[in-house]
Amino acid sequence: FTQKLAFDYSRNRIGDTLLKINPDYFLNGDTLQHFFSVRFTYTVDFRNMKYYPLTGTFFEFYIAKQGFAIHDNVNVLSTTLTLNQYYQVNKKWYAAIGTRVKYSLPAHQPFNLQRGLGYQGDYINGYELYVIDGQQFAIQKLNIKYHLLQFSVKTNSKNIFTKGADVPIGLFIKAFANGGYVEDAFENNMNKLANQFLYGYGLGIDLVTFYDSAIRFEYTFNREGEKGLFLHADSCF
């Protein structure tokens, strides 16, 4: 169990050119944005590994208030819930299901503070190249994987800490499917993927080594009929 509390202050300024392109960048035609923020995170982590979990449960609750001082010109409240479950089906097979939901208000928010999908680890497979802005979103992720190989390679490093060390390497093959939805209250023709159900699916190979770090090769298909090979070095959900 971990809890984190953070405070900060932000002061942002834009020029008249950006204001003409997007009057809602700071809302109300403002060119100066200033506000205090407070953020709280509560995490329960019972996974067997942090970066490449195979069994266990991960739960996280996050809430943030942007703007609470008298002279702040921002007022946004947002909260996010994450619940991931990891299962060992038998000796070689594993499965996982992950859910992440964000809710924020009011609906009309400064454009620069909105966070839908496409930021950090919040994305649907097959839409890695997209940013889908919005005030609310929900993602459901599923995967099933098979532990194909496990071996080690002895290093030739001259470093006294790694000399002659065995580098463990695990190889997993998997199938996955994701679905999600982003709600955007802005009337914006540039954000065409918002306010509709999106999905992606595909096959992949995960290479797992030191400190449970993983390199993931994933070939995906999405609802738009697009397909492609993606390389990920971030942690799995």
Image (tube, grey):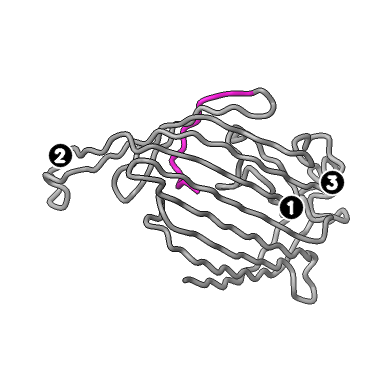
Closer to the chain start, of discs 3 and 2, is 2
In the image shown, does 38 or 216 lie closer to the viewer?
A: 216
Closer to the chain start, of discs 1 and 3, is 1
Residue 69 counted in the magenta span: no
Say whether residue 123 is left or right of residue 187.
left
Q: Residue at x 67, y 69 (%)?
A: 37
In the image shown, does 144 or 162 lie closer to the viewer?
A: 144
Q: Residue at x 15, y 39 (%)?
A: 154
- Give the x, y percent position of residue 193: 75, 36
State the image quarter where residue 157 is shown. Answer: top left
For disc 1, the neighbor class at 10 Å (few under 14, some 14 to 19, many from 20) is many
- Give the x, y percent position of residue 188: 84, 39
Q: Residue at x 43, y 40 (%)?
A: 233
- Give the x, y percent position of residue 143: 50, 40
For disc 3, the neighbor class at 10 Å (few under 14, some 14 to 19, many from 20) is some
- Above or below, comparing residue 38 to residue 112 in the picture: below
Q: CA distance from mark 1 to mark 3?
A: 12 Å
Query: At numbered mark 3, what does the secondary structure look like: helix, strand or loop?
Result: loop
Give the residues drawn in magenta, as a range.
Answer: 226-237
At label 1, which amino acid type do we have?
Answer: Gln
Could you say which disc has been placed on residue 136 in the image? 1
Closer to the chain start, of discs 2 and 1, is 1
Could you say which disc has been placed on residue 186 in the image? 3
- Give the x, y percent position of residue 27: 84, 55
Q: CA distance from mark 3 to mark 2?
A: 56 Å
Q: In this figure, which residue is indicated by the disc labeled 2?
A: 154
Nearer mark to the viewer, of 3 and 2 = 2
Residue 231 counted in the magenta span: yes
Nearer mark to the viewer, of 1 and 3 = 1
Query: At numbered mark 1, what does the secondary structure look like: helix, strand or loop?
Result: strand
At label 3, which amino acid type do we have?
Answer: Phe
